[in-house]
Amino acid sequence: MRLVGFGIAVFAGVLLCVRFLAIPTATYPILFGITIIGALGALAYLFYSTWFANQNS
């Protein structure tokens, strides 16, 4: 359930950044790019570690 909540939060955060922070995002593309890619990468890592974890341990 935490993974679903985190996914919803990341998706909502990206949508809000695109909608309300367009000018700051264009002004500081490196900062926002790293932040957004980092959040999506963390979500992908959590998804992978949840669904494809080693079942023997």
Image (cartoon, rainbow, N blue to C red):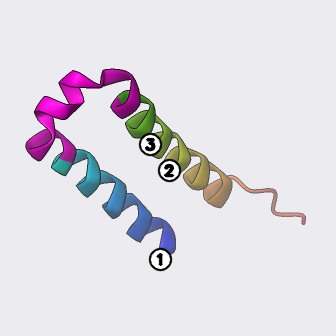
Q: Is residue 48 left or right of residue 4?
A: right
Residue 43, label in figure: 2
Q: Magenta region: which residues? A: 17-32
Q: Residue at x 52, y 45 (%)?
A: 44
Magenta stretch: includes residue 36: no
- Separation of disc 2 and disc 1 at Cα? 13 Å
Mark 3 secondary-structure assignment:
helix
Q: Which mark is residue 38?
A: none
Q: Which residue is more in the foreground, 48 or 23?
A: 23
Residue at 26% across / 46% down in the picture? 14
20 inside magenta stretch = yes
Residue at the far right: name it: 57
- Quarter of the image with the C terminus is bottom right
Pick the front one: 27 or 55? 27
Can you give x and y, in whole percent of width and height, for residue 26 in the image? 19, 23
Q: Residue shown at 17%/50% (left/top)?
A: 16
Provide the secondary structure element on which disc 1 rests. Answer: loop
Q: Position of residue 13 (x, y in %)?
A: 27, 53
- Report the residue marked by disc 1: 1
Q: Mark 2 or mark 1: name the one nearer the start of the chain.
A: 1
Query: Which of 32/44 is in front?
Result: 32
**Do the residues under discs 3 and 2 have CB atoms within 8 angstroms?**
yes
The residue under label 3 is which amino acid type?
Answer: Leu
* In the image, farthest residue toward the bottom: 1
Q: Which is more foreground, mark 2 or mark 1? A: 2
Residue 12 appears left or right of 50: left
Task: Give the residue type that dot 1 points to.
Answer: Met
* Residue ID for mark 3: 40
